[in-house]
Amino acid sequence: MAYADRISDLARTLAQYPTSVTITGSKIDIRTAKQLESLNAQISNDQSLARDGDTLIAAGSGKDAKALSQRIADAAPQVGNLLAAFGAQDAERFKTLSIMSKQKFDASAASRLQAEKRFADEVAKLMMQESQAVSALPTSPCGPKPQPTPTPTPSPGPSPSPSPVPSLDDVIASLPGYLPITIPDAVAGYDADSLAIASKAAGDAAIKLGVKTPDGITDYAIVYFTNGPETFDPKSDPQWAQEIIADKSLGTIDDRLAILLNASKAQQQSPDTLDTPSQETVPGQED
């Protein structure tokens, strides 16, 4: 395996993901120019080390194999460390965003951020593999080694079957037991029978809305009981809830319900945040 080429392939794949998004007409950087400069510099450093390792592996030996192996191992986690540092910077950058805009940004930026995480993990794995391969090289050329006699390997046993995904009806049926544990205050006024009836109504309404996943059912139910069923009525307030539900750019209805639940929790902590229009400042566009 040419490790440097593999890292280059991964870098080209990562570069295909957008580094900015447009939220309510304003461009917001997922990665600032300075962050991209730092990331590209680290990738170039990793590629250079990997090329040195590839050269020694191709030669079959090298007097500085041990030292190079250590440098490659030391560099393996650096992309991940850099991304972690970016996360701290981003938390500061996005303080001026309203909750609504931050929710939309998170949804739009998810594919890029997930791609970065995969890239960092894969690069770290490749470099650790190369470090081990370089470390095993002799420090001076030697003749061909005798081939070891292959030993039979035991056949792997059957892998465990994945846990079955519960049906939506099963999830709805479990709500009367789930909700008192998850949101006890919101359902404290229900007895067992009335909670069962209300849970069935909430579950049926979620399916009618288009929910397709168990998480979508539970997210809907939590908002339904915490904020009230009127949250899902297009003719009722709060308007921010209706905007999230109607905004198809945020993903599937299940994705939007997850965002709505997070926004609902934030609104409970700061009730005026979502109901009052804010004059927000877009990071990177301050006066």
Image (tube, grey):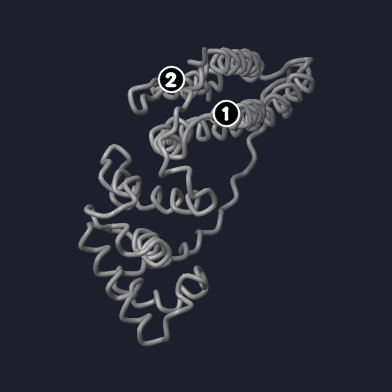
State which quadrant residue 40 falls in. Answer: top right
Mark 2 burial class by Cα count in 10 Å: few <14, some 14-19, many 20+: few
Mark 1 burial class by Cα count in 10 Å: few <14, some 14-19, many 20+: some
What is the spatial separation of the Cα atoms under label 2 and label 1, in whole angstroms? Answer: 19 Å
Observer-nearest of 11 and 161: 11
Of tags 2 and 1, the one toward the viewer is: 1
Residue type pointed to by label 2: Ala
> Who comes first in sequence, dot 2 or dot 1?
2
Question: Residue visible at 66% across and 26% down?
Answer: 78
Image spot of residue 44 (x, y percent): 59, 13
Residue picked out by circle 2: 15
Q: Does the rendering let one see residue 214?
A: no
Q: Secondary structure at mark 1?
A: helix
126 is higher (above) or lower (below) than 154: above
104 is higher (above) or lower (below) than 137: below
Question: Residue visible at 56% across and 53% down?
Answer: 152
Question: Residue visible at 65% across and 16% down?
Answer: 49
Observer-nearest of 189 and 62: 189
